[in-house]
Image (tube, rainbow, N blue to C red):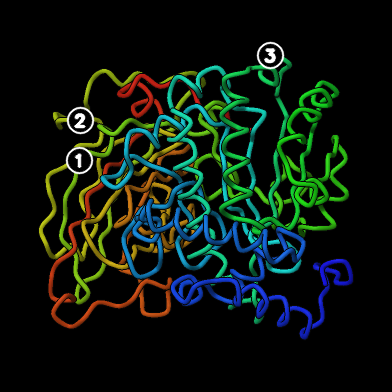
Amino acid sequence: MGASVDVDNPTRAQRAAAIEQLRDKLSDEVNSYCSDLDVWRFSVARQLDTEKAAVMINAWYEWRKQANVDELAVAQPDNENPVPCAVRGYGAVADANVTAGIGVDDAQLRLTRTLGGGCWHKRDRDGRPVYIERAGRHIIKDIPKTSSTSGLVEFHVLLQEFLTRTLLPECSQLAEQTVWQQVVVIDLAGVSLVALSHIPALNMLREMLVRDQMLYPERMYRTYVVNAPPVFVTAWKMIRSWLDPRVISKIRILGKDHAELLDQIPAHNLPSFLGGSCKCSHMPGGCVPSVPLGNYPDLPRSAYAHLRHQVLISYTEPRHSFVCETMPVSNGPTPMSSPLMGYAGWLGIKRDSPRNSAPTSPVPMRTQHVFVRFSTDRGRGMVVEVLWQPLGSDSDDGILVYPEALFEPQRAPVLLELEAPNRAGQLVVNWRVANFDEGQAPFPRPEEAQIPIQLEYSVDTEDELLTAFSLPPIKRS
Protein backbone atom coordinates (compact mmCIF):
# COMPACT_ATOMS: atom_id res chain seq x y z
CA MET A 1 0.00 0.00 0.00
CA GLY A 2 2.79 2.45 0.93
CA ALA A 3 4.22 2.45 -2.58
CA SER A 4 0.94 3.57 -4.12
CA VAL A 5 -0.07 6.30 -1.65
CA ASP A 6 1.15 9.87 -1.65
CA VAL A 7 1.36 10.37 2.11
CA ASP A 8 1.32 14.14 1.72
CA ASN A 9 -1.91 14.07 -0.28
CA PRO A 10 -3.78 10.86 0.55
CA THR A 11 -7.42 10.37 -0.22
CA ARG A 12 -9.75 10.08 2.73
CA ALA A 13 -10.15 6.37 2.05
CA GLN A 14 -6.38 5.77 1.88
CA ARG A 15 -5.82 7.58 5.17
CA ALA A 16 -8.60 5.65 6.89
CA ALA A 17 -7.28 2.34 5.57
CA ALA A 18 -3.75 3.08 6.82
CA ILE A 19 -5.05 4.00 10.26
CA GLU A 20 -7.17 0.85 10.47
CA GLN A 21 -4.27 -1.39 9.43
CA LEU A 22 -1.98 0.06 12.10
CA ARG A 23 -4.65 -0.07 14.80
CA ASP A 24 -5.05 -3.80 14.09
CA LYS A 25 -1.41 -4.21 15.22
CA LEU A 26 -1.85 -2.32 18.49
CA SER A 27 -3.15 -3.42 21.86
CA ASP A 28 -6.43 -2.11 23.23
CA GLU A 29 -4.47 -0.05 25.75
CA VAL A 30 -2.40 1.70 23.10
CA ASN A 31 -5.38 2.11 20.79
CA SER A 32 -7.45 3.82 23.46
CA TYR A 33 -4.58 6.22 24.17
CA CYS A 34 -3.93 7.21 20.55
CA SER A 35 -6.01 9.50 18.40
CA ASP A 36 -6.42 8.78 14.70
CA LEU A 37 -4.01 11.64 14.06
CA ASP A 38 -1.37 10.00 16.26
CA VAL A 39 -1.75 6.74 14.36
CA TRP A 40 -1.54 8.53 11.02
CA ARG A 41 1.62 10.47 12.02
CA PHE A 42 3.47 7.30 12.93
CA SER A 43 2.23 5.56 9.78
CA VAL A 44 3.57 8.38 7.63
CA ALA A 45 6.88 8.46 9.53
CA ARG A 46 7.43 4.85 8.46
CA GLN A 47 6.02 5.31 4.94
CA LEU A 48 2.93 3.23 5.80
CA ASP A 49 5.02 0.21 6.77
CA THR A 50 2.63 -1.17 9.38
CA GLU A 51 5.14 -3.40 11.19
CA LYS A 52 7.73 -0.63 11.61
CA ALA A 53 5.09 1.92 12.58
CA ALA A 54 3.70 -0.43 15.25
CA VAL A 55 7.14 -0.83 16.83
CA MET A 56 7.60 2.93 16.78
CA ILE A 57 4.23 3.83 18.29
CA ASN A 58 4.52 1.18 21.03
CA ALA A 59 7.92 2.57 22.05
CA TRP A 60 6.45 6.08 22.05
CA TYR A 61 3.57 4.98 24.28
CA GLU A 62 5.88 3.23 26.77
CA TRP A 63 8.12 6.32 26.92
CA ARG A 64 5.22 8.66 27.62
CA LYS A 65 3.95 6.45 30.43
CA GLN A 66 7.35 5.85 32.02
CA ALA A 67 8.40 9.51 31.78
CA ASN A 68 4.99 10.81 32.96
CA VAL A 69 4.90 13.14 29.97
CA ASP A 70 1.18 13.77 30.36
CA GLU A 71 1.88 15.21 33.82
CA LEU A 72 4.23 17.93 32.58
CA ALA A 73 3.34 21.47 33.68
CA VAL A 74 2.40 22.80 30.24
CA ALA A 75 1.00 26.33 29.93
CA GLN A 76 -2.64 26.20 28.82
CA PRO A 77 -5.58 28.60 29.11
CA ASP A 78 -7.04 26.80 32.14
CA ASN A 79 -3.88 26.81 34.29
CA GLU A 80 -1.21 29.21 35.54
CA ASN A 81 1.88 27.37 34.29
CA PRO A 82 4.62 29.55 32.74
CA VAL A 83 5.40 29.45 29.03
CA PRO A 84 8.54 27.44 28.14
CA CYS A 85 9.88 30.07 25.74
CA ALA A 86 8.92 33.43 24.26
CA VAL A 87 5.48 33.62 22.61
CA ARG A 88 4.04 36.22 20.22
CA GLY A 89 0.63 36.46 18.60
CA TYR A 90 -1.49 33.67 20.12
CA GLY A 91 -4.69 33.73 22.14
CA ALA A 92 -4.30 30.59 24.26
CA VAL A 93 -1.56 32.37 26.19
CA ALA A 94 -0.66 36.06 26.22
CA ASP A 95 2.55 37.37 24.68
CA ALA A 96 5.39 36.63 27.06
CA ASN A 97 9.13 36.27 27.55
CA VAL A 98 10.69 33.73 29.90
CA THR A 99 11.17 35.34 33.31
CA ALA A 100 12.34 33.91 36.62
CA GLY A 101 8.96 33.01 38.09
CA ILE A 102 8.27 30.39 40.72
CA GLY A 103 7.37 27.79 38.09
CA VAL A 104 10.54 28.33 36.04
CA ASP A 105 13.47 26.29 37.34
CA ASP A 106 17.09 27.36 37.30
CA ALA A 107 18.03 24.80 34.64
CA GLN A 108 15.61 26.39 32.17
CA LEU A 109 16.96 29.85 32.95
CA ARG A 110 20.52 28.69 32.36
CA LEU A 111 19.53 27.25 29.00
CA THR A 112 17.74 30.47 28.07
CA ARG A 113 20.96 32.37 28.72
CA THR A 114 23.11 30.16 26.49
CA LEU A 115 20.67 29.49 23.65
CA GLY A 116 20.43 32.19 21.01
CA GLY A 117 16.73 32.80 21.51
CA GLY A 118 13.60 30.93 20.49
CA CYS A 119 10.04 32.12 20.00
CA TRP A 120 6.72 30.84 18.69
CA HIS A 121 5.96 33.78 16.48
CA LYS A 122 2.49 33.94 14.94
CA ARG A 123 1.37 31.75 12.00
CA ASP A 124 2.20 30.93 8.39
CA ARG A 125 -0.16 31.49 5.44
CA ASP A 126 -2.03 28.25 6.15
CA GLY A 127 -2.44 28.85 9.88
CA ARG A 128 0.45 26.73 11.16
CA PRO A 129 2.39 27.99 14.19
CA VAL A 130 5.87 29.32 13.38
CA TYR A 131 8.84 28.65 15.63
CA ILE A 132 11.94 30.82 15.15
CA GLU A 133 15.32 29.85 16.58
CA ARG A 134 18.27 32.26 16.51
CA ALA A 135 20.72 29.35 16.43
CA GLY A 136 23.54 31.52 15.11
CA ARG A 137 23.56 33.31 18.46
CA HIS A 138 23.91 30.16 20.59
CA ILE A 139 26.85 30.29 22.99
CA ILE A 140 27.81 26.82 21.81
CA LYS A 141 30.72 26.17 24.14
CA ASP A 142 28.57 26.94 27.20
CA ILE A 143 25.62 24.69 26.35
CA PRO A 144 27.32 21.45 27.53
CA LYS A 145 28.45 23.33 30.66
CA THR A 146 24.98 24.53 31.61
CA SER A 147 22.91 21.48 30.67
CA SER A 148 23.23 17.74 30.32
CA THR A 149 22.01 15.98 27.19
CA SER A 150 19.03 14.63 29.13
CA GLY A 151 18.27 18.13 30.40
CA LEU A 152 18.30 19.53 26.87
CA VAL A 153 16.02 16.73 25.68
CA GLU A 154 13.61 17.33 28.58
CA PHE A 155 13.45 21.02 27.70
CA HIS A 156 12.75 20.15 24.08
CA VAL A 157 9.97 17.79 25.19
CA LEU A 158 8.37 20.63 27.14
CA LEU A 159 8.48 22.80 24.01
CA GLN A 160 6.89 20.07 21.91
CA GLU A 161 4.15 19.42 24.47
CA PHE A 162 3.34 23.14 24.57
CA LEU A 163 3.07 23.10 20.79
CA THR A 164 0.87 19.99 20.79
CA ARG A 165 -1.47 20.79 23.67
CA THR A 166 -1.74 24.56 23.47
CA LEU A 167 -0.81 26.13 20.14
CA LEU A 168 -2.02 23.53 17.63
CA PRO A 169 -5.57 23.34 19.06
CA GLU A 170 -5.84 27.14 18.86
CA CYS A 171 -4.49 27.20 15.29
CA SER A 172 -6.94 24.46 14.32
CA GLN A 173 -9.84 26.44 15.71
CA LEU A 174 -8.81 29.58 13.85
CA ALA A 175 -8.20 27.72 10.58
CA GLU A 176 -11.43 25.71 10.95
CA GLN A 177 -9.51 22.57 10.10
CA THR A 178 -6.99 20.34 11.84
CA VAL A 179 -3.57 21.99 12.05
CA TRP A 180 -1.06 19.42 13.30
CA GLN A 181 2.33 20.64 12.13
CA GLN A 182 4.56 23.66 12.68
CA VAL A 183 6.94 25.64 10.51
CA VAL A 184 10.46 26.08 11.90
CA VAL A 185 12.86 28.87 10.98
CA ILE A 186 16.49 28.45 12.05
CA ASP A 187 18.45 31.69 11.72
CA LEU A 188 22.21 31.09 11.47
CA ALA A 189 23.20 34.76 11.35
CA GLY A 190 26.31 35.17 13.49
CA VAL A 191 27.34 31.51 13.53
CA SER A 192 31.05 30.69 13.38
CA LEU A 193 33.10 27.74 12.16
CA VAL A 194 34.17 27.08 15.76
CA ALA A 195 30.53 26.79 16.82
CA LEU A 196 29.71 24.44 13.94
CA SER A 197 32.56 22.12 14.89
CA HIS A 198 32.08 21.99 18.68
CA ILE A 199 31.82 18.23 19.20
CA PRO A 200 30.17 18.11 22.68
CA ALA A 201 27.39 20.44 21.54
CA LEU A 202 26.95 18.56 18.26
CA ASN A 203 26.57 15.29 20.18
CA MET A 204 23.81 16.87 22.24
CA LEU A 205 22.13 18.11 19.07
CA ARG A 206 22.32 14.65 17.52
CA GLU A 207 20.65 13.04 20.52
CA MET A 208 17.90 15.65 20.52
CA LEU A 209 17.23 15.22 16.80
CA VAL A 210 17.12 11.43 17.04
CA ARG A 211 14.70 11.56 19.96
CA ASP A 212 12.58 14.19 18.25
CA GLN A 213 12.11 12.02 15.16
CA MET A 214 11.13 9.02 17.27
CA LEU A 215 8.85 10.77 19.76
CA TYR A 216 7.28 13.61 17.75
CA PRO A 217 7.20 12.38 14.14
CA GLU A 218 5.55 14.52 11.48
CA ARG A 219 5.12 17.54 13.74
CA MET A 220 7.28 19.59 11.37
CA TYR A 221 5.79 20.74 8.06
CA ARG A 222 8.84 22.63 6.82
CA THR A 223 12.15 23.86 8.26
CA TYR A 224 13.94 26.84 6.75
CA VAL A 225 17.61 27.33 7.60
CA VAL A 226 18.26 30.97 6.74
CA ASN A 227 21.39 33.13 6.64
CA ALA A 228 23.42 29.94 6.27
CA PRO A 229 27.12 30.80 5.74
CA PRO A 230 29.32 28.77 3.35
CA VAL A 231 30.92 26.94 6.30
CA PHE A 232 27.54 25.41 7.13
CA VAL A 233 27.90 23.05 4.15
CA THR A 234 30.39 20.91 6.05
CA ALA A 235 28.27 20.76 9.20
CA TRP A 236 25.13 19.99 7.18
CA LYS A 237 26.74 16.90 5.65
CA MET A 238 27.15 15.51 9.16
CA ILE A 239 23.78 16.66 10.52
CA ARG A 240 21.78 15.20 7.63
CA SER A 241 23.26 11.77 8.39
CA TRP A 242 21.29 11.85 11.65
CA LEU A 243 17.97 12.53 9.93
CA ASP A 244 15.39 10.35 8.22
CA PRO A 245 15.11 10.91 4.47
CA ARG A 246 11.58 12.23 4.88
CA VAL A 247 12.76 14.82 7.41
CA ILE A 248 15.57 15.89 5.08
CA SER A 249 13.07 16.40 2.26
CA LYS A 250 11.29 19.02 4.36
CA ILE A 251 14.37 21.16 5.05
CA ARG A 252 15.26 24.17 2.90
CA ILE A 253 18.75 25.66 3.18
CA LEU A 254 18.64 29.36 2.29
CA GLY A 255 21.21 32.12 2.28
CA LYS A 256 20.27 35.75 2.78
CA ASP A 257 17.49 35.65 0.20
CA HIS A 258 14.26 35.35 2.19
CA ALA A 259 11.88 35.22 -0.77
CA GLU A 260 10.96 31.58 -0.18
CA LEU A 261 10.40 32.31 3.50
CA LEU A 262 8.00 35.11 2.60
CA ASP A 263 6.12 32.71 0.33
CA GLN A 264 5.46 30.59 3.44
CA ILE A 265 4.92 33.32 6.05
CA PRO A 266 3.20 36.67 5.40
CA ALA A 267 5.43 39.72 5.92
CA HIS A 268 3.36 41.05 8.84
CA ASN A 269 3.95 37.75 10.69
CA LEU A 270 7.67 37.56 9.91
CA PRO A 271 10.30 39.50 11.92
CA SER A 272 11.99 42.37 10.13
CA PHE A 273 15.43 40.76 10.63
CA LEU A 274 14.19 37.89 8.45
CA GLY A 275 12.80 40.09 5.70
CA GLY A 276 9.33 40.68 7.11
CA SER A 277 7.74 43.78 8.58
CA CYS A 278 7.00 42.66 12.15
CA LYS A 279 8.93 44.20 15.05
CA CYS A 280 6.85 43.28 18.12
CA SER A 281 7.91 46.60 19.62
CA HIS A 282 5.50 46.10 22.51
CA MET A 283 7.78 43.42 23.98
CA PRO A 284 11.35 43.67 25.33
CA GLY A 285 13.59 41.94 22.82
CA GLY A 286 11.12 42.47 19.99
CA CYS A 287 10.08 39.45 17.94
CA VAL A 288 12.70 37.02 19.27
CA PRO A 289 14.41 38.01 22.53
CA SER A 290 17.99 36.81 22.80
CA VAL A 291 20.16 36.91 25.90
CA PRO A 292 23.41 36.35 23.94
CA LEU A 293 22.40 39.10 21.52
CA GLY A 294 21.64 41.39 24.47
CA ASN A 295 18.43 42.84 23.03
CA TYR A 296 16.58 42.81 26.35
CA PRO A 297 17.53 42.86 30.05
CA ASP A 298 18.10 39.37 31.43
CA LEU A 299 16.99 39.91 35.01
CA PRO A 300 17.92 37.47 37.79
CA ARG A 301 15.36 35.80 40.02
CA SER A 302 15.97 38.36 42.76
CA ALA A 303 14.69 41.14 40.46
CA TYR A 304 11.17 39.75 40.79
CA ALA A 305 11.31 38.55 44.40
CA HIS A 306 10.70 41.90 46.15
CA LEU A 307 8.88 44.37 43.95
CA ARG A 308 8.50 47.84 45.39
CA HIS A 309 4.72 48.28 45.48
CA GLN A 310 1.97 45.92 46.57
CA VAL A 311 -1.71 46.70 46.08
CA LEU A 312 -4.96 44.77 46.18
CA ILE A 313 -7.42 44.84 43.33
CA SER A 314 -10.52 42.78 42.70
CA TYR A 315 -13.15 41.95 40.12
CA THR A 316 -15.38 44.63 41.65
CA GLU A 317 -12.63 47.26 41.89
CA PRO A 318 -10.44 46.10 39.01
CA ARG A 319 -8.21 49.11 38.33
CA HIS A 320 -5.00 50.62 39.63
CA SER A 321 -2.85 53.51 38.38
CA PHE A 322 0.68 54.65 39.10
CA VAL A 323 1.93 58.14 38.21
CA CYS A 324 5.50 59.40 38.04
CA GLU A 325 7.07 62.56 36.66
CA THR A 326 9.47 62.44 33.74
CA MET A 327 12.23 64.96 33.17
CA PRO A 328 14.35 65.53 30.07
CA VAL A 329 17.76 63.88 30.21
CA SER A 330 20.93 64.85 28.37
CA ASN A 331 23.03 62.41 26.39
CA GLY A 332 24.79 59.83 28.49
CA PRO A 333 23.72 57.89 31.58
CA THR A 334 21.76 59.60 34.33
CA PRO A 335 23.32 59.36 37.83
CA MET A 336 21.15 57.21 40.07
CA SER A 337 23.18 56.68 43.19
CA SER A 338 21.04 58.97 45.35
CA PRO A 339 17.28 58.67 45.84
CA LEU A 340 15.17 61.79 45.31
CA MET A 341 12.95 63.58 47.78
CA GLY A 342 13.90 61.37 50.69
CA TYR A 343 12.11 58.29 49.36
CA ALA A 344 13.68 54.88 49.88
CA GLY A 345 14.39 54.32 46.20
CA TRP A 346 14.48 56.17 42.93
CA LEU A 347 10.77 55.61 42.45
CA GLY A 348 9.88 54.65 45.97
CA ILE A 349 6.37 55.52 47.16
CA LYS A 350 4.23 54.35 50.03
CA ARG A 351 2.00 51.32 49.60
CA ASP A 352 -1.37 52.25 48.17
CA SER A 353 -4.65 51.63 49.91
CA PRO A 354 -6.71 48.63 48.73
CA ARG A 355 -9.17 50.95 46.96
CA ASN A 356 -6.69 51.99 44.25
CA SER A 357 -9.21 53.97 42.25
CA ALA A 358 -7.04 57.09 41.95
CA PRO A 359 -3.43 57.45 40.71
CA THR A 360 -0.72 57.59 43.35
CA SER A 361 1.13 60.84 44.01
CA PRO A 362 3.69 61.75 41.34
CA VAL A 363 7.34 61.06 42.08
CA PRO A 364 10.08 62.87 40.08
CA MET A 365 11.95 60.64 37.66
CA ARG A 366 14.47 61.45 34.92
CA THR A 367 14.11 58.96 32.16
CA GLN A 368 13.41 58.15 28.58
CA HIS A 369 13.30 54.36 28.69
CA VAL A 370 11.23 53.01 31.57
CA PHE A 371 10.83 49.40 32.70
CA VAL A 372 7.80 48.04 34.53
CA ARG A 373 8.05 44.76 36.42
CA PHE A 374 4.83 43.28 37.76
CA SER A 375 3.24 40.05 38.93
CA THR A 376 0.01 38.83 40.48
CA ASP A 377 -0.73 35.95 42.81
CA ARG A 378 -3.85 34.85 40.93
CA GLY A 379 -6.36 36.01 38.34
CA ARG A 380 -6.94 35.56 34.62
CA GLY A 381 -4.64 38.29 33.34
CA MET A 382 -4.02 42.03 33.52
CA VAL A 383 -4.47 44.63 30.82
CA VAL A 384 -1.82 47.39 30.84
CA GLU A 385 -1.96 50.82 29.23
CA VAL A 386 0.50 53.70 29.62
CA LEU A 387 -0.13 57.39 28.96
CA TRP A 388 2.10 60.44 29.09
CA GLN A 389 1.02 64.04 29.58
CA PRO A 390 3.26 67.13 29.35
CA LEU A 391 3.46 69.23 32.48
CA GLY A 392 1.20 72.26 32.35
CA SER A 393 -1.19 70.70 29.86
CA ASP A 394 -4.83 71.67 30.33
CA SER A 395 -6.07 68.52 28.59
CA ASP A 396 -7.21 65.51 30.57
CA ASP A 397 -6.17 63.21 27.73
CA GLY A 398 -2.59 62.00 27.64
CA ILE A 399 -0.44 60.79 24.77
CA LEU A 400 -0.73 57.03 24.36
CA VAL A 401 2.75 55.61 25.06
CA TYR A 402 1.75 51.95 25.33
CA PRO A 403 -1.66 50.83 24.00
CA GLU A 404 -3.75 48.35 25.95
CA ALA A 405 -2.26 44.86 25.94
CA LEU A 406 -3.14 41.71 27.85
CA PHE A 407 -0.52 39.91 29.94
CA GLU A 408 -0.69 36.95 32.29
CA PRO A 409 1.44 37.82 35.34
CA GLN A 410 -0.18 34.96 37.26
CA ARG A 411 2.01 32.60 35.19
CA ALA A 412 5.31 34.41 35.70
CA PRO A 413 6.45 38.01 36.29
CA VAL A 414 6.13 40.39 33.35
CA LEU A 415 8.76 42.90 32.23
CA LEU A 416 7.64 45.76 29.99
CA GLU A 417 9.72 48.45 28.34
CA LEU A 418 8.26 51.91 27.74
CA GLU A 419 9.68 54.89 25.94
CA ALA A 420 8.48 58.21 27.32
CA PRO A 421 9.04 61.53 25.52
CA ASN A 422 12.25 63.21 26.63
CA ARG A 423 10.32 66.13 28.13
CA ALA A 424 8.95 67.13 31.48
CA GLY A 425 5.62 65.42 32.07
CA GLN A 426 3.73 62.69 33.87
CA LEU A 427 3.78 59.01 33.02
CA VAL A 428 0.63 57.10 33.99
CA VAL A 429 0.69 53.30 34.13
CA ASN A 430 -2.81 51.79 34.26
CA TRP A 431 -3.61 48.21 35.18
CA ARG A 432 -7.01 46.53 35.09
CA VAL A 433 -8.32 43.00 35.44
CA ALA A 434 -9.01 41.34 32.09
CA ASN A 435 -12.64 41.38 30.94
CA PHE A 436 -14.71 38.34 30.03
CA ASP A 437 -13.88 38.71 26.33
CA GLU A 438 -10.12 39.18 26.80
CA GLY A 439 -7.89 36.13 26.72
CA GLN A 440 -8.94 32.51 27.00
CA ALA A 441 -8.41 31.92 30.71
CA PRO A 442 -11.62 30.75 32.41
CA PHE A 443 -13.47 33.28 34.51
CA PRO A 444 -13.34 32.51 38.24
CA ARG A 445 -16.19 30.85 40.10
CA PRO A 446 -18.26 33.23 42.26
CA GLU A 447 -16.43 32.27 45.45
CA GLU A 448 -13.03 32.72 43.76
CA ALA A 449 -14.03 36.12 42.42
CA GLN A 450 -14.39 37.37 46.00
CA ILE A 451 -10.70 36.82 46.74
CA PRO A 452 -8.58 39.96 46.14
CA ILE A 453 -5.74 39.82 43.63
CA GLN A 454 -2.39 41.08 44.87
CA LEU A 455 -0.56 43.13 42.25
CA GLU A 456 3.12 43.76 42.90
CA TYR A 457 5.16 46.09 40.72
CA SER A 458 8.20 48.28 40.35
CA VAL A 459 8.75 51.10 37.86
CA ASP A 460 12.38 51.96 37.13
CA THR A 461 14.50 53.97 34.77
CA GLU A 462 16.69 51.96 32.45
CA ASP A 463 19.87 53.15 34.13
CA GLU A 464 18.58 52.23 37.56
CA LEU A 465 17.49 48.76 36.47
CA LEU A 466 20.75 47.93 34.71
CA THR A 467 22.85 49.33 37.56
CA ALA A 468 20.89 47.53 40.29
CA PHE A 469 21.45 44.13 38.69
CA SER A 470 24.88 44.77 37.08
CA LEU A 471 23.59 44.27 33.54
CA PRO A 472 25.24 45.45 30.31
CA PRO A 473 23.62 48.09 28.08
CA ILE A 474 20.71 46.89 25.97
CA LYS A 475 21.51 46.45 22.28
CA ARG A 476 18.43 47.76 20.50
CA SER A 477 18.26 47.27 16.74
Q: Which numbered disc, 1 or 3, marks the residue that appears first in the sequence?
A: 3
Inspect the image, locate mark 3, and give the three-letter code of the amino acid beneath it. Answer: Val
Using residue 279 as the reference point, say whether residue 77 is left or right of it: left
The structure residue drawn at horizontal position 82% and vertical position 21%, both measured from the top left corner, is 231
Separation (CA) of disc 2 from disc 1: 9 Å
Residue 294: horizontal and vertical position, in percent? 53, 27
Q: Which numbered disc, 2 or 1, marks the residue that appears first in the sequence?
A: 1
Q: Name above or below for residue 277 compared with residue 364.
A: below
The structure residue drawn at horizontal position 21% and vertical position 62%, both measured from the top left corner, is 358
- When asked about the image quadrant of residue 253, the answer is top right
The structure residue drawn at horizontal position 61% and vertical position 53%, both measured from the top left corner, is 121
Contact between marks 2 and 1 (CB within 8 A): the answer is yes
One can see residue 406 in this view: yes
Q: Residue furthest bottom?
A: 13
Which residue is the site of mark 2? 345
Which residue is the site of mark 1? 308
Residue 216: horizontal and vertical position, in percent? 59, 55
Q: Which mark is residue 194?
A: 3
Callout in the foreground (2, 1): 1
- When asked about the image quadrant of residue 315, the answer is bottom left
